[in-house]
Image (cartoon, rainbow, N blue to C red):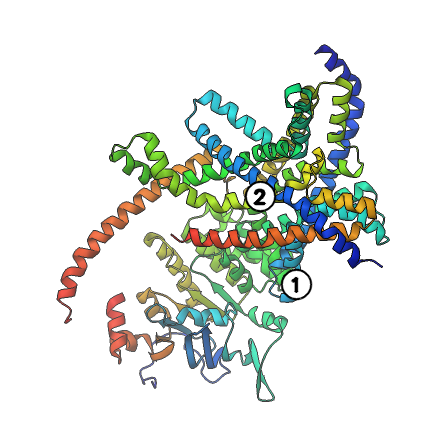
């Protein structure tokens, strides 16, 4: 499906010339005998924000989980900033990279989960500084200062010493976003980050994400059911069905003028 | 009866010796148990088969062959193989191996019970496997495993009584001496059993304390205080009732919704 | 020479003879524990508060004190009473081990009874079934389903505790191994075989119970 001419009028158009931030090459993923993704080829430019939409079971969450190395890639390659993530080709053979190499790559990638997944045995602040100190080797004072400014940014400065269990779902999710940002990721993966929230708490979380989209050039790959949000922040929308890209294009085109029947019926069911 | 108490009073120093032996066995055995349990339990959750399978075999072996067999093996067979342990070490060793194997299974299942989202978040932050376990998973599993460990450590205390079979003079042995010097079986054994009961109660209290501490670190209240358990039971019942009502309502709803949709299938 | 096959061959029939007593103690003990455990569970549910408290204290007391000491206690207490001197040690062993484990099994029954949805109770009440009938015909059969695997696990645990009967000189598996070792110094063969027999009996049983548990769990 070739993208059409009319590009979106977004302020920060991603560069297309540089090495892609993420590249999928012949990606295949199966769980036992069920194939979820097959022959998947696409790339995301640095700074680009791409929303994956599609019916449940279409494989969109699996894509995020593959990039985060939470699932094992059963075929093909994923490149991050031009470098192989989990597998590489050696003498025409597909070989797995050592886990240390992969882990060094994943430090550039952050993820926010549907269920927040804050660590309940740590305070909000400890949640945020854990990885910067023990993975990136930052000094504690730097990490704390950075964490506090991030908490400020997500509007939770006064909650630094609370336990996650004492926060509302929306607050927990904002902490989770701060925790991901504390690693200064080049790529941020957002997996249905508002789906587990009460409707009245969704706005705050989306507000924070909008702010990040406007003020940084982090590459974002997101799966969401918030179509208005997707339309506002993304440069490109990809419609998935049955593990394949059905169509893709700028949000205006996909939402206003979808080409495929499946896309039309999917959009009418969610909008 | 007063005779009994004078005899008991005179016997107290000896009784205390026996209690000390039982305490040493219990404390050293518990420490050994926990060390073995953590090592074997972690090994059993390992993704590497070369760690997992031997650990599983060791656990099944020590769970399946009775404590007394293990004790006698250490006491009678090891010297024939050239390893001479004193009886106290045999006792501690057998207790630690036997209860360590049982506890390893508790450690394994608690680690497996920690929400998979916690593993995923730790991977997403690129924490190393060691850091993941020490800082994220184990503290949460620890809170889950304490109640079962408490039960096992009380079992271990009860198990220490086997050592009088290998010539150690523990509390059980002293109770029998007390029986001989008083000639009153009921008196001697009641005293002995009450002492064991108090020790078991102390272990339980200590473990409750540890559990409270562990759950407080998770920012939760201790989940099984008596009132909590009562509340939980009531909640569970209430929830079940609501669920049933809801599913019944949904079934009715579904029936009425499906009907017309089924007819207008040409959409 | 560490291992002598001749000794092993010689020991095996003696051990198996001892094993018969092990099995008797396990089976009789399990029957006593299963019946008494149910009685305790029902008693705790139905008795008035103060006596209920007493029963629970007694249960906790038996549960949290060593089986070996209890065995010795009852064995010596019986030998003090002229009419009871001649009761065989094995019978004492079965009774004590049965009582000891009934305190564990009562807990399984309690959990099983609690797991029956209250709606079952309500439905039976709605049909005006008398309470006894409600319990025996409606609640208990469903509770047993959830209880049986756990009773099985305790039976296996009891099996592994039978060597404690050594304390009151019942010649069961381990005692016979020790006697054989004492007379031949073939401790290695005797105790290793005893361990293997235990493992060979308990491990498959545990696996069986696990499978039963899974089967019963899926209604």
Figure quadrant of residue B48 = bottom right
Assess disc 2: are there few (<14), some (14-19) or many (≥20) residues with their C-alpha within 10 Å of its C-alpha. Answer: some
Give the percent coordinates (x, y) of residue B227: 46, 33
Q: Earlier in the sequence, mark 1 or mark 2?
A: 1
Residue farthest to the bottom, as pictured: A92
| Residue hosting label 1 | B51
Give the percent coordinates (x, y) of residue C146: 44, 45
Residue C161, horizontal then vertical, whole percent: 64, 41
Q: Is residue B170 visible?
A: yes
Residue C204 image position (x, y, % from top left): 57, 55
Compared to A231, does A205 lie above or below?
A: above
Q: Which mark is residue A7?
A: none
Q: Is residue A108 above or below residue C199?
A: below
**Secondary structure under the numbered disc 1 in the rendered image:** helix
Q: Residue furthest top?
A: B2
Point 67% across, 28% down: residue? C75
Discs 1, 2: same chain? yes
Front-lying residue, C190 or A168: C190
Task: Place residue B261 in its image quadrant.
Answer: bottom left
Q: Which residue is mark 2?
A: B148
Q: Residue at x 33, y 64 (%)?
A: A226
Marker count (numbered): 2
Q: Chain of mark 2?
A: B
- Can residue A271 be seen here? no
């Amino acid at each position: 499906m070739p993208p059409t001419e009319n590009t979106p009028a977004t302020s920060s158009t991603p560069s297309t010339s540089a090495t892609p931030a993420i590249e999928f090459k012949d990606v295949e993923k199966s769980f036992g005998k069920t194939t979820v993704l097959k022959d998947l080829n696409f790339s995301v430019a640095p700074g680009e924000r791409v929303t994956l939409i599609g019916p449940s079971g279409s494989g969109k969450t699996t894509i995020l989980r593959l990039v985060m190395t939470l699932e094992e890639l059963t075929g093909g390659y994923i490149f991050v900033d031009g470098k192989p993530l989990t597998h590489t080709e050696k003498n025409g053979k597909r070989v797995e990279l050592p886990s240390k190499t992969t882990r060094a790559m994943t430090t550039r990638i952050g993820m926010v989960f549907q269920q927040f997944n804050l660590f309940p045995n740590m305070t909000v602040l400890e949640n945020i500084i854990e990885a910067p100190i023990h993975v990136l080797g930052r000094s504690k004072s730097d990490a704390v200062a950075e964490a506090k400014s991030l908490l400020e940014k997500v509007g939770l400065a006064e909650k630094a010493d609370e336990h996650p269990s004492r926060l509302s779902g929306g607050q927990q999710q904002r902490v989770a976003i701060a925790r991901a940002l504390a690693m200064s990721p080049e790529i941020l993966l957002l997996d249905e980050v508002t789906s587990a929230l009460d409707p009245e708490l969704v706005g705050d979380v989306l507000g924070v994400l909008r702010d990040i989209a406007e003020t940084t050039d982090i590459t974002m790959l997101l799966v969401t059911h918030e179509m208005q949000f997707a339309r506002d922040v993304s440069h490109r929308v990809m419609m998935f069905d049955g593990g394949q890209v059905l169509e893709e294009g700028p949000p205006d085109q996909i939402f206003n003028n979808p080409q495929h029947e499946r896309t039309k019926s999917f959009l009418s069911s969610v909008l | 009866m007063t005779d009994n108490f004078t005899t008991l009073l005179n016997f107290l120093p000896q009784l205390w010796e026996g209690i000390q032996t039982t305490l040493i066995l219990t404390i050293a055995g518990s420490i050994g148990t926990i060390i073995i349990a953590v090592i074997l339990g972690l090994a059993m959750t390992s993704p590497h088969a070369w760690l997992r399978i031997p650990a599983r075999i060791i656990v099944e072996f020590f769970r399946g062959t009775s404590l007394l067999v293990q004790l006698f093996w250490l006491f009678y067979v090891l010297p024939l193989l050239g390893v001479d342990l004193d009886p106290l070490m045999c006792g501690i060793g057998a207790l630690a191996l036997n209860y360590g194997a049982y506890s390893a299974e508790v450690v394994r299942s608690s680690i497996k019970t920690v929400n998979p989202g916690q593993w995923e978040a730790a991977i997403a932050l690129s924490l190393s496997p060691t850091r993941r376990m020490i800082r994220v998973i184990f503290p949460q599993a620890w809170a889950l495993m304490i109640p079962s460990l408490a039960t096992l450590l009380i079992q271990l205390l009860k198990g220490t009584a086997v050592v009088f079979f290998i010539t150690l003079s523990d509390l059980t042995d002293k109770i029998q001496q007390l029986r001989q010097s008083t000639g009153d079986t009921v008196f001697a054994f009641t005293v002995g059993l009450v002492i064991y009961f108090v020790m078991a109660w102390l272990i339980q209290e200590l473990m409750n304390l540890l559990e409270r501490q562990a759950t407080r670190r998770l920012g939760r209240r201790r989940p099984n205080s008596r009132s909590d358990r009562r509340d939980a039971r009531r909640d569970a019942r209430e929830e079940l009732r609501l669920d049933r009502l809801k599913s019944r309502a949904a079934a009715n709803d579904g029936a009425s919704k499906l009907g017309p949709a089924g007819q207008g299938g040409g959409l | 020479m560490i291992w002598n096959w001749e000794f092993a061959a010689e020991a095996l029939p003696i051990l198996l003879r001892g094993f018969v007593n092990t099995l008797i103690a396990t089976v009789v003990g399990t029957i006593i524990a299963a019946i008494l455990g149910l009685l305790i569970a029902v008693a705790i549910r139905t008795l008035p508060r103060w006596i209920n408290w007493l029963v629970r204290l007694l249960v906790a007391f038996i549960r949290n004190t060593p089986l070996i000491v209890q065995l010795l206690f009852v064995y010596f207490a019986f030998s003090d009473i002229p009419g009871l001197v001649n009761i065989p040690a094995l019978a004492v062993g079965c009774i004590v081990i049965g009582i000891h484990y009934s305190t564990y099994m009562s807990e399984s029954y309690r959990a099983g009874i609690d797991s029956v949805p209250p709606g079952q109770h309500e439905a039976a009440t709605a049909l005006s079934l008398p309470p006894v009938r409600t319990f025996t015909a409606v609640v208990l059969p469903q509770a047993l389903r959830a209880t049986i695997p756990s009773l099985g696990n305790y039976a296996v645990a009891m099996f592994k505790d039978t060597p404690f009967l050594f304390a009151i000189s019942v010649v069961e598996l381990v005692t016979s191994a020790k006697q054989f070792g004492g007379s031949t110094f073939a401790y290695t063969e005797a105790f290793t075989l005893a361990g293997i027999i235990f493992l060979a009996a308990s491990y498959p049983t545990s696996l069986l119970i696990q499978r039963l548990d899974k089967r019963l769990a899926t209604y």
